[in-house]
Amino acid sequence: MKPGIHPPYSPVVFRDRAAGFAFLTRSTATSDKTVEWEDGRTYPVVDVEISSASHPFYTGTARVLDTAGRVERFERRYGHRRGNGANGERGGPR
């Protein structure tokens, strides 16, 4: 690595306030706010809006998308249209 061009890489606490979840990791992110961690040391804290503790995909509360219904709605709305192509038809075989 080229010296002097990289930001400092140090321990930082990321905190998801919505879920009451925090974890200590290393990052180049900085913050003026600090928090005392479980080990008794004080670290900069970065508040995040969403993390694995509150994201619906990880918590199992994700909604299942109705892809079949979306396709049917598209077909109803736009249908499968045929027009002027090579043999007087546009598009391929249905």
Image (spheres, rainbow, N blue to C red):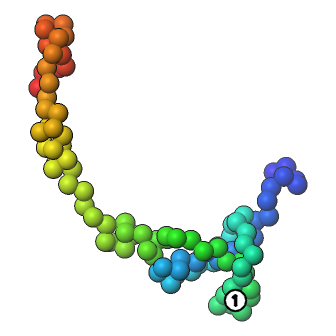
- Confirm whether residue 11 shows in the render: no
Q: Residue at x 81, y 51 (%)?
A: 1
Q: Residue at x 18, y 40 (%)?
A: 74
Residue 32 placed where, x, y %? Answer: 75, 75
* Residue 51, above or below 19: above
Q: Residue at x 64, y 73 (%)?
A: 46
Side of 61 where 42 appears, left or right? right
- Confirm whether residue 42 shows in the render: yes
Which of the pair 65/7 is nearer the observer? Answer: 65
Which of the pair 57/19 is nearer the observer? Answer: 19
Residue 70 placed where, x, y %? Answer: 19, 47
Residue 25 placed where, x, y %? Answer: 64, 73
Residue 6: image quadrant is bottom right
Side of 43 where 51 appears, left or right? left
Q: Quadrant of the C terminus?
A: top left
Residue 91 placed where, x, y %? Answer: 19, 19
Residue 31: image quadrant is bottom right
Give the class, few, some or many, for how many residues have Cα within 10 Å of label 1's Cα (few <14, many ≥20): few
Q: Residue at x 13, y 43 (%)?
A: 72
Label 1 residue SS: strand
* Residue 58, above or below 86: below
Residue type beneath disc 1:
Glu
Q: In this figure, which residue is indicated by the disc labeled 1?
A: 36
Residue lying furthest right: 4
Q: How many marks?
A: 1
Which of the pair 37/69 is nearer the observer? Answer: 69
Residue lying furthest front: 77
